[in-house]
Image: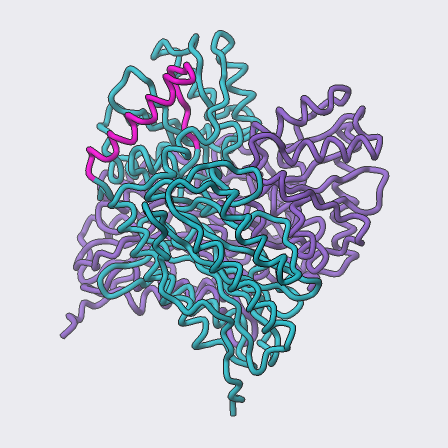
Chain colours: A purple, B cyan
Amino acid sequence: MLTFPISEFQERLHKTKQRMEQIGIEVLLVTDPANMNYLTGYDAWSFYVHQLLVVMVDEDQPYWIGRGMDANAAKYTTWLDEEHIHPYADHFVQSTIRHPMDFVCEFLKTKKKDKKKIGVEMDAYYFTAQCYVRLTQGLRNAVLVDGTNLVNWIRIIKSDLEIEYIRKAAKISEKAMQVAFDTIQEGVRECDVVAGISYAQITGTEEYGGDYPAIVPLLPTGEKTSACHLTWTDEPFTEGAPVIIELAGCYKRYHSPLARTAVIGKPSEEVYRLSEVVIEGLNAALDCIKAGVTCEEIEQSWRKSIEKNGVKKESRMGYSTGLNYPPDWGEHTASIRPGDKTILQPNMVFHMIPTIDLGPIGMEISESFRVTENGCEVLANFPRELYVKPNIRLA
Amino acid sequence: MLTFPISEFQERLHKTKQRMEQIGIEVLLVTDPANMNYLTGYDAWSFYVHQLLVVMVDEDQPYWIGRGMDANAAKYTTWLDEEHIHPYADHFVQSTIRHPMDFVCEFLKTKKKDKKKIGVEMDAYYFTAQCYVRLTQGLRNAVLVDGTNLVNWIRIIKSDLEIEYIRKAAKISEKAMQVAFDTIQEGVRECDVVAGISYAQITGTEEYGGDYPAIVPLLPTGEKTSACHLTWTDEPFTEGAPVIIELAGCYKRYHSPLARTAVIGKPSEEVYRLSEVVIEGLNAALDCIKAGVTCEEIEQSWRKSIEKNGVKKESRMGYSTGLNYPPDWGEHTASIRPGDKTILQPNMVFHMIPTIDLGPIGMEISESFRVTENGCEVLANFPRELYVKPNIRLA
């Protein structure tokens, strides 16, 4: 079931160890599920219990530590041999007296790593405060060092095979968005449109199936378009109200996000005008992308364009994306925003999503792109426009 | 958009403050998205950035703190007035220099709560180690106290309206499981069956729509049934291989999980026998449930039944469920396992899922139930058996 050749996993591990040596740590505890997958292939919905990889600079394989009932998932999905799969007993799960990190402390002692400098992903979703406190208490002779995003920064440049997966995800995103456009109609319930989007995301194409995206479809309508992270209701769509659709295709955990805004029937002048401003700004930003440009320079192009049109926007307008798990398909590394001086390199992948909300109206038209030497490859091939759905009333 | 009467939210808040006073804390920082929803109604896919409620024993409403672009979601989905919605600026998002908890510290200072005993949910998924460290550094005169699961333990007993939502979720779980049974067939791809399941989960019924479950459908097949948290692939189903389907219906964030095992064509003697053992054990466990019984007593009934049949099982066999967000529909309170002395009370809801794996074969047949005075109400009405799918070869 390996999703990449073992050599690619080993190359990723090699780069991880190089970074570890640069910051002087001998052990890295990798708790981010995307980072666990990146280094070993591990893929299961088991991140609701504590689990991690232990990467040691002097070992050829990381150790997987997780719940007993997930050890077989580690055997099936990773390149690790059985000696590197260390399950903990079930009485560690959601217990008030035992914690899985106690098990990790004991493991590090048997490996004589309990007096070392150990990196931990301090701000990773599933590395809780309690994990940190238990490690601190159990490893009194160790020094815990912040390793947040250490692996994420390696993930930021994709291999050609990763890009191939992301292109497949982009195809799925096109199909899912088309389903949204085809089914949105006055009187149709929001949930029925999202059901169709989800079907398209998972069924994928005839050649390959889809995976679950790290974020469910977001579908705010009407004045709720100014609250871009709302999901959906079972209310019917109404004529004239804008609808934001943000979704991603996902293939083997690799994402290609895409957002569009639709209106059923005639859009108001204000909505139409806003879509023109957003598209002009998006085009200006895409035009300036190539290897060597910085993230903040892209944002400047965008801001210059929209300010010329009298619109201001404060939040970041994009972020690195790729391999991920819920709750986020963003990589938490480079952001397209003022102050981010990350220099674009070929095979970086971003989701550029300039969310605009003007009082009660919000607008999202986005693209995911791959950086190339001389420009960028926009991943999904989908009309970059406000979608106006003819309103044909249902009988 | 409120999902409950304000009086119900206030009642929940009242109980929360009572617990806070019992453990001597004046402020509770609520980061678990399910707890945030429980106390205020807040519902958006925004838990990928740091957000929380600040509950103060001397205030009538909690404060919502989150990202600026999510403030409108707080306005639309909660009963809080605008004064209790405190967004932070976008430059706090995934920054290497600023952290949202710095904003929280400043907020607590302005409210003169920075020298108090403050509860934090130490082992909640999105309360990271970094959150804790920043609070510790920013609130040097405060005492941070562990408030993990404080609100969860209030959630464990459901109101009648919550039960109504869970019953609606159970109806959706029946429909989704039926779609799985109807579409599983030799030669059909796993992803296509899951696409149908997901469609059914989200479209719901004609009367009401479905919400996204906190866990995607799990669908291990063949020998992978011994790895119960695997999701799906785009491989076709094969004759004779068992398939585990674990899913939940979800209505307004309330879950009713359900698992079944299916076989295409004739099951092996071993698989059939195992299903009989599991069902007998499940029935024995269900028979002993009523208010006043402890969680560990349920497990004893189950264990006695399966051991009589020569099967042993180590992991817990159930947990409290209800309102939740990814990555878990479990509530992290009572577990049906040895040592758990929680006394059952009416309107507690559990998912009883005795996962069994015997070497290469795994089996799951589960039920969600509501505790009543004299027994239990099994929530989904779905045949409690190994599903044998006649193998009709596709042309």
Residue A144 vs residue A367, the one in the foreground = A144
Residue B15 highlighted magenta (yes or no):
yes
For residue A230, say whether it is visible: yes
Q: Quadrant of the N terminus of chain A?
A: bottom right
Q: Is residue A268 left or right of residue B376?
A: left
Q: Is residue A174 left or right of residue A307?
A: right
Q: Tell me residue B110's x, y (percent).
A: 35, 11
Residue A181 vs residue A148, the one in the foreground = A148
Q: Residue at x 77, y 31 (%)?
A: A22
Specify the quadrant of the image occupied by residue A302: top left
Most common SS among magenta residues: helix
Q: Please determine whether, in this image, residue A390 is positioned above or below residue B76.
A: below
Q: Which residues are magenta?
A: B5-31
Q: Tell me residue A322's x, y (percent).
A: 57, 51
Residue B347 highlighted magenta (yes or no):
no
Residue that extends furthest to the bottom in the rendered view of this protein? B395
Q: Is residue A358 left or right of residue A202?
A: left
